[in-house]
Amino acid sequence: MTKRFDLRPQHVYRALILLQFALLFTYLVPVFDASGFMLYLFVVFSMTLRWRFPIAPHFMLIDCVVVAIAAAFFPTNTPFLALYLFYFSYKNKMIFCLFPILVSFILATGPGSYLIVLTIVPGYLLYLWQNENTLLRKEGDDLRQKIHHMEQTETHLLQDYHDAGRISQLTERQRIAEILHDNLGHELTAAHLTVKAIGTLLQSDQREKALQFQQKAEERLDTALTQLKTAVRQIEPDNDSDIRRITSLFENFVYPIQYSQEGDLSQVPPHLRQLMYISLKEALTNITKHARPTTITALIECTQSIVRLVLENDGILPAQSAPAGNGLRYMRKRIEAVHGSLSTSRDKTFKIIVILPIRA
Amino acid sequence: MNLYTFALKEDCRQPLNILLIALLPMVLLLIPAHPQSFPFGLNLYGMVMLYSAFLLTRPVVEDRMKGIVVRIAASPISHLRYLSSHLSAYVTLMIIQILLFCLGILIVHRGNVHGYGHILLLYISFSIMAIAFALAWNTLFRAFNLSFGIFSGVGSVMCLISGVSLPPFLIPESITGYTMFLPTYWLPYGLDAIYHGEASGILISHVVLWAYAIIFLLVGSKRRL
């Protein structure tokens, strides 16, 4: 990939410095004397030093004084001050410009010498350009930093989401274990001990007592079975309440929704029903935020292998042409985590389609 | 082995460098003496020094080409140490060459040359300038061959018009004003000043050569990865 050349103020600054050196060279040769040549070398050194190392602009005043002193003895060297004026104006040190301007006016040998002062103009224009460039670059950097922070937050949020899922799973397991222990453990232990006692009674030919114990054991096992059924009912997710939560989302929404459902929603695993609920809630929040719909249609299709949610509204606002926001991005990440897919289409209406596989 | 000795060995490993350092300058001693100036071989030696310096600085360019500079940047060796060790090694080799050449002058042109100390110092100043110039020149190019190809042309022209490879009296006066801006001009200028015993001329040539050396070092020392 070829690197595109990006013209920057410092490139123009360097080019103009070189141009000034070339002009000074052509100026110097006809009026040549040793002082001019030595001063030329000094100014080249002074500028190269600034190009090579970041030296504070006020140190340039020392160099400028040296040139001014040399120009005072050899006035033909006054044009060298143009370079310093250019430098100070580029660095926006206008107060420092006063010294070379003053010296130029004092030592001016002809009208051409006054032109030296004009080098302030390109210098200052370059400073303005440089300033604008710096601001733009800073804004770009800030934006990139913001995006980076947002991405980090997103990663943390998703991590928290997975952690929370894992914690709730462990809590649920513990609850199941407690229910089984509290409700079944006692009755089954008692039944187990009774059966053992029956064996002992039969060995010592106490048949009547053994029969009584057998009856007690049967009663305990019956109670245990009843308690097991109750426990399973407690543990099992409530399909009806999940479905009711989803339908109530549509019914209680600020805009009327034409809702239709195909297939049996109770076949969908509870964690997917929760994901459907979260996704629909997010999509409806987006509608309240970014659309003014007259018609909203919602469709939930359940088949043996997938669940398909389609939510469509016709209230796209003209200004809403921005790319997907965080809500939609998080939704996509959650859906993709269960191997599902999310797609959107934007035409006369805005349509959001979510597909969740029942058997991944 | 420190960087300095490494740079010395690296340069001495190439037979061309040995040839340039030890033998080629001796050929210049065979040029006969001139009645109103030093033997012309003394001027022409400036050209040999310029090309010697260029060839000696080759490892610095090659380090950049091969990406060794990047590895050095990642190591605890500073760029200043890397560059100063290499440059001092090159200066050492150049001083050896100058000493050999001056020894040759002493033997061959005993009656025609005076001010050996001044000549030696002037050559040393010029050689430092030549090394700095080669370093700065090489920063403009990525490949040594291209750099050397262009330099061989530019260097020859520089030496020709500044009185190094052509007797100064043959250079038209109209261009002497411009040639003063060439760093190579100041070697024949200095030699002429030594011949005529002009202390100010000798001093000026030293000052200018050092000024050029510093400017070229500033340009050439910029790290390019």
Image: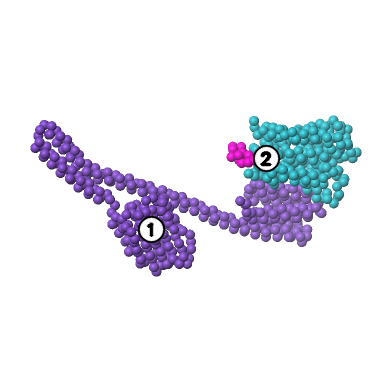
The type of residue carrying mark 2 is Glu
In magenta segment, residue B214: no
Q: CA distance from mark 1 to mark 2?
A: 64 Å
Q: Is residue A265 above or below residue A317?
A: above
Q: Which mark is residue B62?
A: 2
Where is mark 1, residue-wise?
A: A308
Q: Residue furthest right?
A: B35
Q: Please, what secondary structure does the residue beneath circle 2 have?
A: helix
Mark 2, other Cα within 10 Å: few <14 / some 14–19 / many ≥20: some
Q: Percent position (x, y) of residue A84? A: 69, 53
Q: Nearer the viewer, residue B186 or A278?
A: A278
Is disc 1 in the same subunit as disc 2? Answer: no
* Residue for point 34% across, 63% down: A260
In magenta segment, residue B70: yes
The type of residue carrying mark 1 is Arg
Region in magenta: B66-78
Q: Nearer the viewer, residue A30 or B60?
A: B60
Q: Which chain is in purple here?
A: A
Q: Nearer the viewer, residue A165 or A17?
A: A165
Q: Percent position (x, y) of residue B87? A: 70, 38
Quarter-wise, where is residue B80 in the image?
top right
* Residue for point 33% across, 52% down: A269
Quarter-wise, where is residue A221 in the image?
top left
Total numbered labels: 2
Q: Colour of chain B?
A: cyan
Name the chain under label 2. Answer: B
* Residue for point 24% across, 42% down: A181
Q: Is residue A266 visible?
A: yes
Q: Is residue A151 left or right of residue A309?
A: right
